[in-house]
Image (cartoon, grey):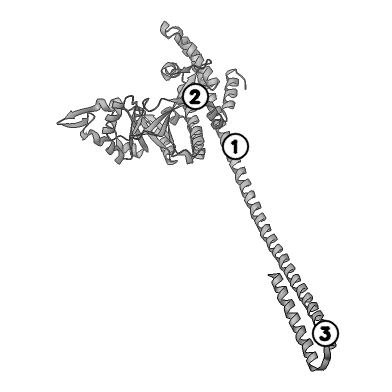
Amino acid sequence: MRRLTLALLCATYLCLSLIVALTLWRYGGGWGAGVAALAGGLGLCFAFHGMIERILETGAIKGEIEGVRDAQRILIDQVERLDARVTEVAESVAEAALRRSEQLADEVHMLESLVDRMRRQLDDHGANYISEERGAPAARRHSPALLETIRDALAENRVDLYLQPVVGLPQRRTVFYESFSRLRDESGRVLMPAEYLSVAEPAGLMTAIDNLLLFRCVQIVRRLAKQDRKIGIFCNISMASLADDSFFPQFLDLLTANRDLAGALIFEVGQAAFEGRTSLEARNMGKLADLGFRFSLDKVVDLDLDLQDLSRSDVKFVKVAGQLLLDELTEVDGRLILRSLPDLAAEDFAALTRRYGVEVIAEKIETERQVVDVLDLDIGYGQGHLFGEPRAIRDAVLAEADPPSAYLRTHFQRRAAGGR
């Protein structure tokens, strides 16, 4: 475009010079005057053109400089915004790190309290319990050794978390997990509850084991939430833990700091324990409910439930053994009913609980036939070995979810050895 403009200007200058030269020649100037006029006109025109071109180039340079300045201003503005964002992110990371540090400090403090309680219980009950066992029948004389195994498992933090799926019916997609605790001896053999409960309960260790399980469940739920896995975990909580004036306030503080996990952590209590709860235990359940945490009822032996009481107490799930449901079925006047609820059609039981915000979970499902019968009762959830056995959470998962575990092991070993 610039070359075309230059060519047009040159043609214009040439035409003007020719016009001047022809005018002089025509009016008597002769060829010499005409040629001189032509040469002089071209010279003046090109000099004028050079001046104009320099002016235009100067203007273009000024425009480019102004453009560079504008770009610099934009760049400076972007750098300032980026710096502000980096500062904001750094402050957020620092605040998160501080909160995490405080959270871990609270967790470690809670673990220390649990460890001290276990040590005191072992010191207070261990010797008396062993002396009592010495006078027991031969079939029970292995208990002191088993008690020592339990003590070692706690000291070495060999308390494992097992999860069993709870599925939605009929699709059988996992929607919840139930947590269980298992102890391991030094050889790695897993001690089943039926094996260690008879020893741990008289020795006063079950509360400590249950509390460690509660603590571990909170950590695992937090880990799942970090992975954006929207799934809930049922975790047993004993009435003794709810009434423990040293453990419960710390546990409540921990849950308050993690109240965003309320939708994923469901506390489970037995039917008998729930119906026999004290006013203190009921109040502490209410404090957990105020944070948004829900409850589940298990070990159900009576289907004549007080649904209004369950609803008031934020009990959202009731677990009933599949075989109990089937044993309760009977036919009267051609109508299938539950013996505990003779005025209600059996298929309406789950619908009735739902009206109070309570879902029924059929647990201990072992056969496909039980699944068919449970579906006939319009029950929406199932649990049992048919859908999946309890499986241990891998150490690699716990290593990230349970950072104070090394502290627990070292501290308990030092306490057990009598040190500080």
Q: Is residue 280 visible?
A: no
The circle drawn on residue 35 is 3
**In the rendering, at what x and y percent does residue 162 appear?**
46, 26
Q: Which residue is mark 2?
A: 160
Question: Residue 104: image x %, image y %?
Answer: 57, 34
Nearer to us of marks 1 and 3 is 3
Give the CA separation, mark 3 to mark 2. Answer: 112 Å
| Location of residue 319 by image quarter | top left
How many residues crowd mark 1 within 10 Å: few (<14), some (14–19), many (20+)?
few
Q: Amino acid at mark 1?
A: Ser
Front residue of 53/64: it is 53
Most extreme residue toward the bottom is 27
Q: Which residue is tagged 1?
A: 101
Q: Nearer the viewer, mark 3 or mark 2?
A: 3
Question: Is residue 274 left or right of 162 when viewed as pictured?
Answer: left
* Amino acid bearing label 2: Asp
Q: How many marks?
A: 3
| Dot 1 or dot 3, earlier in sequence | 3
From the viewer's perspective, tell me whether residue 76 is left or right of residue 323: right
Query: Which of these two is toward me, 12 or 404?
Result: 12
Residue 37 is drawn in which quadrant?
bottom right
Q: Distance between the Cα atoms at labels 1 and 2?
A: 25 Å
